[in-house]
Structures are given as C-alpha cells and as structure tokens.
Image (cartoon, helix red, strand yellow):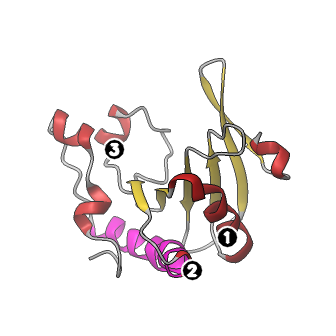
Amino acid sequence: MISKHITVKEATQSATATRLKIDNTPSAEVLANMKLVAEKCFEPLREWYGKPITINSFYRSPALNKAVKGAKNSDHVKGMAIDLDAGSDNKKLFDYIRENLDFDQVIAEFPVNGILSWIHVSFKKDGNRKDVLVARKINNKTVYISYKNEKDLI
C-alpha cells in the first residue's frame, strides 16, 4: 500500500503501459516520494472529502511518460505528483488543496465554464513553492497561467 486509500497497483496502473508493454514499476526512492505525496496531499484531502477520489495518474516511468507525451521534467516520473478526478467536485477539491494543504503545485487542468477536467497536485520533501496554476490549451500547446481568482477558470 502507498497509503490507507491507495494501492501500489492503483498508483502505477496505465492502459498505455499495458498496451505498449512498458514496465511502470517505481524504484524504492520513487515509492518513498509517492508515500509522501499520499500522506501530505491525498489522504488529508480524502479524509476531508469523505468519498473516493479517482487517481488518473500517479507514477509514470520515464518510458511511459514519453509515451503519453508528458513534460520532460514531470514530477510524475519522480513519484512527486498525482492527478485526481472527483467529477463535478473537482473545483471544490482544488479550492481545498490551495487553501488548506502544503504542496509544490496545484493545477486546475483544462477548465471549461468553471468545470475542471482534473486536478494535478505535487509535493516535494523540501522547498514547496505553493504554485497555483491553470492549464489551458492554446494553439494546441498546453500553457500554464497563474491562478488569481474564479475568473481564471471560465
């Protein structure tokens, strides 16, 4: 188990890895990072929310990250980031994270009329920046803007 509510299987599962036969097994160091993200970000959020939260992506091996066209410096490769989805409650979870938890980055991913596609949250052992961002597609490229208020999600 990574934490009370996250199994290693859930944290490493990937349809792309299965399809392409990519090994997505984390090292001991990555596993330790994953446990820290779960302890500091996921479990407090899950406890507050009181309902299951879907994990879209947690660990991605370098080969898997390349296959899904993830950022070259993605924290997922280090086990320091998790993508979460609670459907129509994503905004509520985003607000809770940014107002109540320590984190390196929390990103409202691809909002449409205030509805977030998912939430990305990362945590580092040292030096968390508390960056609050919004991800948007502009000219087929993902662009990150600093979140200032609700208008940034429209």
Q: Earlier in the sequence, mark 2 or mark 3?
A: 2
Please name the amino acid that badge 1 sits on.
Tyr
Residue count near mark 3 (Cα–Cα under 10 Å), binned few <14, some 14–19, many ≥20: some
Please name the amino acid that badge 3 sits on.
Pro
- Residue 25, horizontal then vertical, whole percent: 22, 57
Does the residue at mark 1 contact the one at mark 2 (Cβ under 8 Å)?
yes
The disc at residue 151 is: none
**Residue under label 3:** 62
Does the residue at mark 2 contact the one at mark 3 (Cβ under 8 Å)?
no
Please name the amino acid that badge 2 sits on.
Trp
Q: Is residue 136 above or below residue 147?
A: above
Looking at the image, can residue 104 be seen? no
Residue occupying image coordinates x 54% and y 80%:
44
Majority SS type along the magenta span? helix
**Residue under label 1:** 96
Q: Which residues are magenta?
A: 28-47
**Residue under label 2:** 48
